[in-house]
Amino acid sequence: MPLPWLIAGIVAACAWCSLLSGLGGWIMGRDLAGREQQALYETEIAQQKDLPPLGVLVTRLDRTGPAARVGIQRGDMIVAIDGKHVQDARDLRELLRVLRSGDTVRLTLLRDTGGEADLSLTLDPFPGDTRRPYLGVYYTARGDEPADL
């Protein structure tokens, strides 16, 4: 066998091996990437357990409202009402919807300065609609527009 044919055969064999290993690596790489993505997701979930719960950020207060009277401050995060977790604004509205003015509730807060606080307050009647309870805070959660409760 002449030398040029031998070299051409070696080059062709190397090309096929390279192609097949590349294809196998691509297939395996996709599988490994999926496993790595799952591992990353599980790590993120595990780390989130150490993070404070989401909540509702107090952006403003009615200075004469019940929240201001008990010491809630702008920047506080409401994370629970009567021990029930508040993840977002919808949770806060749902929990307040079953309450009446005059009810006393316990709010769990994460302070803007760090730390946690439990405060009890008595809900006022909502201005203009005395059937609804009034907390006296303007709040936002997860990019929601500020609302008034």
Image (cartoon, grey):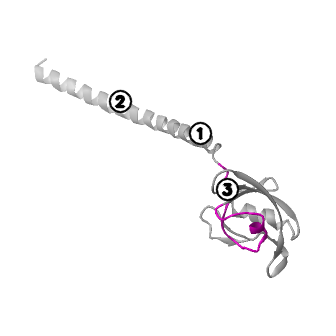
Question: Disc 2 marks which residue?
Answer: 21
Query: What is the three-letter code of the residue carrying label 1?
Result: Glu
For marks 2 and 1 on the same chain, the one whose residue lies earlier in the sequence? 2
Q: Amino acid at mark 2?
A: Ser
For image coordinates 64% across by 43% down, the residue present is 50
Asked whether disc 2 touches disc 1, contact meaning CB atoms under 8 Å apart, the reply is: no
Element type at mark 1: helix
Q: Which residue is mark 3?
A: 111
What residue sits 48% from the left and 34% below the top? 32
Q: Is residue 20 above or below residue 66?
A: above
Q: Residues within 10 Å of mark 3 (few under 14, many from 20)?
A: some
In the current view of this chain or complex, which residue is farthest to the bottom? 128
Q: Which residues are magenta?
A: 52-75
Q: Amino acid at mark 3?
A: Arg
Label 2 secondary element:
helix
Q: Residue furthest top?
A: 1
Q: Earlier in the sequence, mark 2 or mark 3?
A: 2
What x and y, as percent, mark residue 93? 76, 66
Label for residue 102? none
Task: Count residues near mark 1 (Cα–Cα under 10 Å), then give few for <14, some for 14-19, many for 20+.
Answer: few
Query: In this orientation, which residue lies closer to the viewer: 128 or 31?
Result: 128
Between 90 and 96, the residue placed more toward the observer is 96
Name the residue rendered at 67%, 60% in the picture. 76
22 part of magenta stretch: no
Number of the front mark, 1 or 3: 3
134 w.r.t. 9: above or below:
below
Q: Please tell me whether residue 28 is drawn above or below residue 70 in the rendered image.
A: above
- Circles 1 and 3: CB distance less than 8 Å? no
The residue indicated by pointer 1 is 42
C-alpha distance separating marks 2 and 3: 56 Å
